[in-house]
Amino acid sequence: MTDGLHWSIKASFVRYILGMQDGLYAVTDDASVSPEFVFTFPKKDVSGFDAATGLGTLKFVGAVRFGGHGGSLYVMIADPIVEITATGAVLSAKVDNDGERLDLVTLDFGKTASGTPSWDAVSTFLTANGASLFIGQYPAGTPFDPLNITLAQLDATSAPQRA
């Protein structure tokens, strides 16, 4: 897996888009999508992350846009940033072409079977701001799909502890 943030966002939402007669999606700005609809946002800057504490900022690049319903449905997730603090973690993204950034989902870093923190299958939960992006279709707190963060300089010892 290449360095970056790998996320299927919400599989049921993607299926809904693909099932619409005029549903479409596009990946741009270096983002990519797998045949299983896992969207990859490549690493942009991780200099704001402290591997010793597991805290800081991880920046990624790329955009995915979804549309349908004759143009009345439009969702953009671009240039995601993961911010990890001592009190929690959140993924924000640009959500329009003017660069407005919203806190989209909170993150819950799990642990491996041996008890070490994991960068794989990180649980995500929609924020109130994220709910507005999806026009209230999903309420705040709705689980979204887990994401993976793959970076050569990260390992289990640098993943944040679950609060």
Image: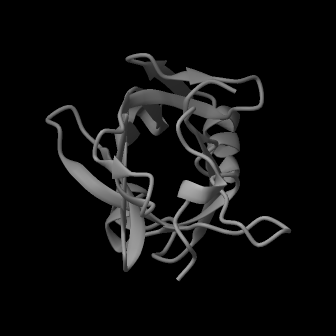
Q: Residue at x 37, y 80 (%)?
A: 87
Is residue 72 visible to us here? no
Front in this rendered view, residue 120 or 74: 120
Q: Residue at x 66, y 45 (%)?
A: 16
Which of the 4 image quarters holds residue 135? Answer: bottom left
Is residue 120 visible to us here? yes
Q: For this view, does 93 lie left or right of residue 6?
A: left
Residue 62 location, x and y as percent?
Answer: 40, 26
Instruction: Please determine whether, in this image, residue 116 is positioned above or below residue 23.
Output: below
Q: Residue at x 66, y 65 (%)?
A: 117
Instruction: Please determine whether, in this image, residue 70 is positioned above or below residue 137.
Output: above
Which of the 4 image quarters holds residue 130? Answer: bottom left
Residue 150 location, x and y as percent?
Answer: 60, 38
Q: For this view, does 46 lie left or right of residue 125?
A: left
Image quarter where the N terminus lies is top right
Instruction: Please determine whether, in this image, residue 39 is positioned above or below residue 29.
Output: below
